[in-house]
Amino acid sequence: MEKVLTQFTINKIAQGNLEDSPFKDINYRRLSDDPNKFIIRKSYLGNDVACRPTKVKFDNTLDSQNIQAQLVILEKLKESPNILKFYGLSEVDDYQVMVFEWVEVNLMEIYTKNDIDWDLKALIALDICRGLLFLHSCDILHHDIRCKNIMITSRLGAKISNFQYAKIKTDSTIPIPRVDDMIPWMAPEKLNGFKYNFKSWEGIPQIRATLQQIFLKLVELSEICKKPSYQYVLYPDGHIDFDGSNSNSNPS
């Protein structure tokens, strides 16, 4: 672990370089999944950023090693537009913080309150796939890809976030508590008795569609979308009749 960490330098942001955000009404927010955790909105180099309190101690405890490994991974992933950008470590109001780009909502919050038309779904899926391909090119496994860890920008672009359980492929797996929460997003071979009808859900990894094959299919789908992603809007829940159940027409 220590040999890996010495290859990287974690960016340290001076506290004075984090300015108050002009959005005074929403510069502090508790996280919905844990009310004891919160983020502070600041401005850094003209960009809105999310400051997440953390505790990084450079010692040999397991917790310290895990969070150091997370920081190493975040430093490696700064170049992908489909991964939430990590700026570095700083301090805000006597809290040590990890500084990320600011994004308002995650995919779970979006789809529980809105309808997303099929063209936009294809573009969001393509963004996620691009992020995953970048992770794989860096030999990094995320281990917690689910809707609440996919952030959605104001332009409806998707970015992968939350690298708490991520690891470099050759490192030991980090213990994951509350694994039941992740069951709907687990690999099919980990779900006993799981029934599948799609190539990407094959229970045997060797015959399952590869990420590259899925990427090419998503590119093909995105090319027939009606308009670029920045022209899409989110509709209120129930606005789009996806399956015809809201139709008033009678069968002939």
Image (cartoon, rainbow, N blue to C red):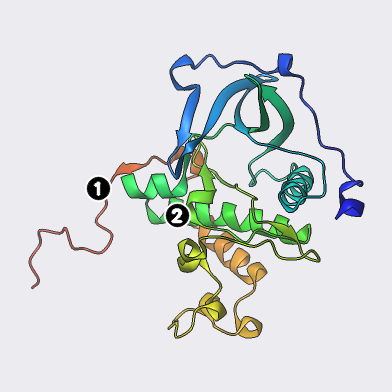
Tell me which residue sits at (45%, 67%) in the image: 184
Label 2 residue SS = helix
Q: Position of residue 186 (x, y in %)?
A: 53, 69
Left/right placement of residue 126 relative to residue 80 reads left
Mark 1 residue crowding within 10 angstroms, few (<14) / some (14–19) / many (20+): few
**Any mark on residue 40, and which?**
none
Whether residue 78 is visible here, answered yes or no, is yes
Is 61 in front, or is 154?
61
Which residue position is annotated with label 1?
239
Check the image and report above or below for 231 versus 206: above
Is 56 in front, or is 168?
56
Mark 2 residue crowding within 10 angstroms, few (<14) / some (14–19) / many (20+): some
Left/right placement of residue 57 relative to residue 203 reads right
Check the image and report above or below for 23 versus 138: above
Q: Position of residue 7 (x, y in %)?
A: 91, 47
Label 1 amino acid? His
Given contact means CB atoms under 8 Å apart, are the residues at marks 1 and 2 in contact? no
Q: Which is nearer the N-term, disc 1 or disc 2?
A: 2
Q: Position of residue 114 (x, y in %)?
A: 33, 45
In this rendering, the count of numbered labels is 2
Label 1 residue SS = loop
Tell me which residue sits at (49%, 41%) in the image: 156
Whether residue 114 is visible here, answered yes or no, is no
The N terminus - image quarter: bottom right
Which residue position is annotated with label 2?
121
Tell me which residue sits at (44%, 86%) in the image: 193
Quadrant in the rendering for residue 90: top right
Check the image and report above or below for 35 versus 119: above
Tell me which residue sits at (63%, 81%) in the image: 205
Quadrant in the rendering for residue 9: top right
